[in-house]
Image (tube, helix red, strand yellow):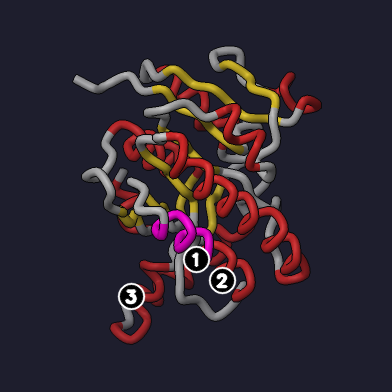
Amino acid sequence: MSVARDVLVTGGTGYIGRALVPELCSRGHRVRVLARPGSLARVPACAEGVAGDALDAASLAQALRADDTVVHLVGTPHPNPAKAQQFLDVDLASARALARVAARSGVAHIVYVSVAHPAPVMQEYISARLLGEQAIAAQRLTATFLRPWYVLGPGRRWPALFKPLYGLASMLPQWRESAERLGLVTIEQMVRALAQAVAAPPPAGSVRIVDVPDIRAA
């Protein structure tokens, strides 16, 4: 029998969050969504909207409760190499703020969306996400790091054109590992993997890695 958890979702009005929040509610979790005041109207009706800013430690501290599971989805939309500074100012800054505050707040589990690596492109994005992982791990927090490469969904399906190339690469021994590690996942697979992470945290104080094959298996 699954345990109903108190879940705070940051970035819950974004691309993944809009699909994840209703799924968490349907599984019986008590869900709150941290959102800036102008975005509160976009919080799904099944969840409680909490006004705040994920980049501000004081705001996070007010939103967090002891024993919360925090799903951290804050990030730069449509990342590309031209947004390198935003990766530092938004993606990394929010992860570091969460790590500092969560360590003091008695948070039970952090579920953090990172990125698959190594990869031949998007080095600034990968660096920011890995530094976010390090900030959370340094606080000895119980955490799950999901590492997708690209999440296919509404308005984000053009990479599916490369599926034949992925299929070819998976048949070649020298490319197989990279093709699996940097494979495409769907929004449905991502939501299921996140929901499973919420339901089943790793042992206290440890970090679990969920890579592309594991996301697909969810």
Asked where in the image residue 68 lies, by quadrant, the reply is: top left
Is residue 173 positioned above or below 129 on the image?
Answer: below
Dots 2, 3 in contact, CB < 8 A: no
Q: Residue at x 41, y 60 (%)?
A: 138
Between 199 and 203, the residue placed more toward the observer is 203
Instruction: Choose between 61 and 94: the one closer to the eye.
Output: 61
Drawn side of residue 117 relative to residue 204, left or right: right
Q: Which residue is mark 2?
A: 127
Residue drawn 54% across the image and 80% down it: 120
User: Which badge, 3 or 1, is on the more N-terminal residue?
Assistant: 1
Q: Which residue is mark 1?
A: 130
Which residue shows up at 25% across the image and 43% down it? 204
Q: Label 1 to label 2, Cα distance in Å? A: 5 Å
Q: Is residue 209 left or right of residue 7?
A: left
**Residue lying farthest to the bottom in this orientation:** 174
Q: Which residues are magenta?
A: 130-138
Position of residue 176 measured from the top left corner of the image (x, y, whole percent): 33, 76
Q: Is residue 133 magenta?
A: yes
Magenta region includes residue 152: no
Q: Give the amino acid type for the residue marked by disc 2 in the picture.
A: Ser
Q: Quadrant of the C terminus?
A: top left
- Residue type indicated by callout 1: Leu
Residue sitting at the far left:
1
Closer to the observer: label 2 or label 3?
A: 2
- For residue 177, the mark is 3
